[in-house]
Amino acid sequence: MNDRRCLMAKIKRNCTYLLTTAGKQKIEKQLSELSPNGYSDRQIAQATGLHRTTVKKILKMDRGVSFRTLENFFTHLAIDLNSSDYQESQLQKKTIYQDWGDAPDTQAFFGRETELTTLKQLAIEHRCRLIAITGIGGIGKTDLSLHLARDIQDEFEFVIWRSLINTPPLTEIIGDLIQFISHQQIGNLPDKIHQQISLLLEYLKTSLFTNFR
Ligand SMILES: Nc1ncnc2c1ncn2[C@@H]1O[C@H](COP(=O)(O)OP(=O)(O)OP(=O)(O)O)[C@@H](O)[C@H]1O
Ligand SMILES: [Mg+2]
């Protein structure tokens, strides 16, 4: 990895948030006004565009979610989110590493709500490992994927953005990923591509193991 990219890697604290009792009461009040017979988690998930497990997570108040998820939840239920409605979860703080490379700066972004909801569900709830966005030139694939990546960045420990537009050699891309995920610990990368891939997989496994411990 070149020095410029090393410098661009940034480390930030990833905070997750829990509802407070006041926030939970606000939601319950709104739900009972919307439907006196009550809502199931499935109906709330449909109304908010979140997955049922995320809805349960929020309402049980035992596991934190990203601020953006909480914000979406309130917005879809047409309730204002105030600072008294949530608290930072002390249990789930972790360091996240990001390198946005040459990601374009998207100034204004309109619409695409349905697509973003589907993509978020695929990436977060279904843990899809590969998502392809295809379409004719200029239709908005890059902007959509960038918007998605920025929306869900807090859900991941590592975020790296690379454009393949100039078809960089595979060895360059893999080397870049290894340096990023190993925190620039590798002095000399192996020459052969299959060795580089094995090394990358090794780092990914170690990282996953650390995450789930
Ligand atoms: N939802 C959107 N709101 C506003 N502008 C958008 C939106 N989507 C795309 N654009 C703008 O349209 C232009 C083309 O978008 P983008 O580069 O994402 O298309 P693309 O499908 O990736 O194109 P290509 O196939 O050439 O890579 C850009 O200027 C982008 O900022
Ligand atoms: Mg593009």
Image (tube, rainbow, N blue to C red):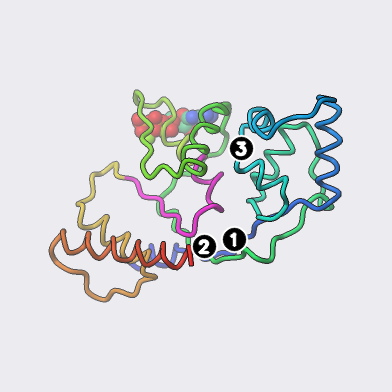
Report the disc number at residue 29. Answer: none
- Which is more N-terminal, label 1 or label 3? 1
**Residues packed near mark 1 inside 10 Å, few (<14), some (14 to 19) or many (20 plus):** some
212 in relation to 61, above or below: below
Residue at horizontal 81 percent and vertical 45 percent from the top: 24
Q: CA distance from mark 3 to mark 1?
A: 23 Å
Q: Quadrant of the N terminus?
A: bottom left
- Which is more N-terminal, label 1 or label 2? 1
Instruction: Determine which residue is flagged by label 3.
Output: 52
Q: Are marks 2 and 1 in contact (CB under 8 Å)?
A: yes
Residue at horizontal 44 percent and vertical 58 percent from the top: 99
Q: Point out the stretch of residues depicted in magenta.
A: 148-163
Q: As drawn, is 124 to the left or to the right of 39?
A: left
| Helix, strand or loop at mark 1 | strand
Instruction: Determine which residue is flagged by label 2.
Output: 96
Instruction: Determine which residue is flagged by label 1.
Output: 14
